[in-house]
Image (cartoon, helix red, strand yellow):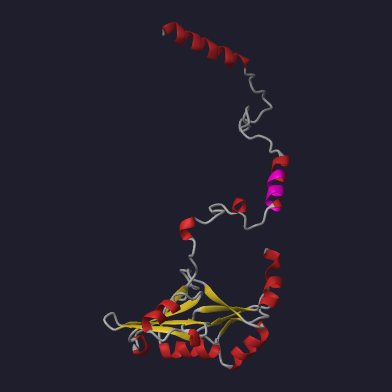
C-alpha cells in the first residue's frame, strides 16, 4: 500500500513539471486551461433543420406531449366550462339574447342553495322529455357552459363579484365564440350595449374581438374567414 502511494505521488509531481509556468504577460484572471469549448455551428443547423422538418404540434417540438393518447381515454371529450355568476336573470338574458345560446338543463340544489344552468348551441327540440334522460343528453353535448349561481348573491349589497382571471393573480382567461362575421357581430353587440375589451380593429390582431359578459368574464369573438390570416404569423 505504501509503495503504491509513493508511486502515485511521484506520478503527480512529474505531471506538474510538464505544466508550463505562465509568463509575465498573462493576466492572472485568464485560466491556463479554458473550460469552454468552441461551439460547432453544424450541430445547431442540424437541430433547426429537424425542427423545420416536423410540424410545430409534433411531440418532438413539445416536451411532455404524448404522441398517442392512452387507450383508456378513448371516448373522452371536452364537455363543459363552469364559472360562477352573480345574477342568473342577467346572465341568462346575455347568453340567450346576445349570444344566441339555449338553456339545455337547469339543476337546483336547495340543501346547498345553488343552481346550475347549462347553456349551449344545441337544438333543445331534440332533448328528451324525461328528466333523467335530459340530464344524460345535456352531459353528452360538447363545449357547454355551466353557469353556477349561489343563491342570494344577486341581492347581496356586500357581494363584490367574482374574479374573472384577467387581473392579478391571473388564471382563467376566456372562452371563445365563432361567429359568421366578426365585424357584423360586433356592430350588433355595440348596439346592444355589450362591453368591449377589444374591438376588431384595436391593436395588432385585426379581425378578432373580446367582449365581457355581465360578470366581467372575457369572451373572444372570431370568424373562420379571418382567424387563419390573423394567426398565420404564429403558425
Which residue is at the far left?
A: 111
Does the stretch in magenta take in 99? no
Say whether residue 102 is visible: no
What residue is rendered at 57% in x and 53% in y? 67
What residue is rendered at 35% in x and 90% in y? 155
Q: Is residue 154 left or right of residue 123?
A: left
- Classify the position of the N terminus by image quarter: top left
Q: Is residue 63 left or right of residue 90?
A: right
User: What secondary structure characterizes most of the magenta part?
Assistant: helix
User: Which region of the structure is painted magenta?
Assistant: 46-52
What residue is rendered at 28% in x and 79% in y? 112
Question: Quadrant location of residue 130?
Answer: bottom left
Residue 218, placed above or below residue 56: below
Image coordinates of residue 27 in percent, x first then y, are: 65, 31
What residue is rendered at 69% in x and 71% in y? 228
Image coordinates of residue 41 in percent, x first then y, are: 72, 41
Question: Quadrant location of residue 183?
Answer: bottom right
Say whether residue 82 is visible: yes
Q: Nearer the viewer, residue 75 or 234?
A: 75
Residue 26, placed above or below residue 156: above
The number of discs equals 0
Q: Is residue 145 left or right of residue 159?
A: right
Image coordinates of residue 19 in percent, x first then y, are: 62, 18
- Classify the position of the C terminus by image quarter: bottom right
Which residue is at the far top?
A: 3
Does the stretch in magenta take in 49? yes
Q: Nearer the viewer, residue 79 or 190?
A: 79
Amino acid at each position: 500500500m505504501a509503495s503504491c502511494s509513493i508511486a502515485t505521488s511521484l506520478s503527480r509531481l512529474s505531471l506538474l513539471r510538464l505544466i508550463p509556468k505562465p509568463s509575465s504577460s498573462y493576466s492572472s484572471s485568464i485560466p491556463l486551461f479554458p473550460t469552454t469549448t468552441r461551439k460547432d455551428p453544424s450541430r445547431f443547423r442540424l437541430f433547426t433543420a429537424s425542427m423545420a422538418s416536423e410540424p410545430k404540434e409534433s411531440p418532438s417540438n413539445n416536451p411532455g406531449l404524448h404522441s398517442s393518447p392512452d387507450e383508456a381515454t378513448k371516448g373522452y371529450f371536452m364537455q363543459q366550462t363552469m364559472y360562477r355568476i352573480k345574477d342568473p336573470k342577467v346572465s341568462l338574458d346575455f347568453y340567450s339574447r346576445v349570444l344566441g345560446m339555449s338553456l339545455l338543463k337547469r339543476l337546483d340544489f336547495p340543501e346547498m342553495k345553488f343552481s346550475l344552468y347549462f347553456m349551449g348551441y344545441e337544438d333543445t327540440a331534440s332533448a328528451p322529455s324525461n328528466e333523467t334522460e335530459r340530464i344524460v343528453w345535456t352531459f353528452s353535448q360538447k363545449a357547454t357552459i355551466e353557469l353556477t349561481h349561489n343563491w342570494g348573491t344577486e341581492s347581496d349589497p356586500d357581494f363584490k363579484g367574482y374574479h374573472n382571471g384577467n387581473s392579478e393573480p391571473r388564471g382563467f382567461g376566456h372562452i371563445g365564440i365563432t361567429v359568421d362575421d366578426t365585424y357584423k357581430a360586433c356592430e350588433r353587440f355595440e348596439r346592444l350595449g355589450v362591453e368591449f375589451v377589444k374591438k376588431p380593429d384595436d391593436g395588432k390582431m385585426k379581425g378578432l374581438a373580446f367582449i365581457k359578459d355581465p360578470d366581467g368574464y372575457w369572451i373572444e369573438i372570431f370568424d373562420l374567414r379571418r382567424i387563419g390570416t390573423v394567426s398565420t404569423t404564429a403558425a
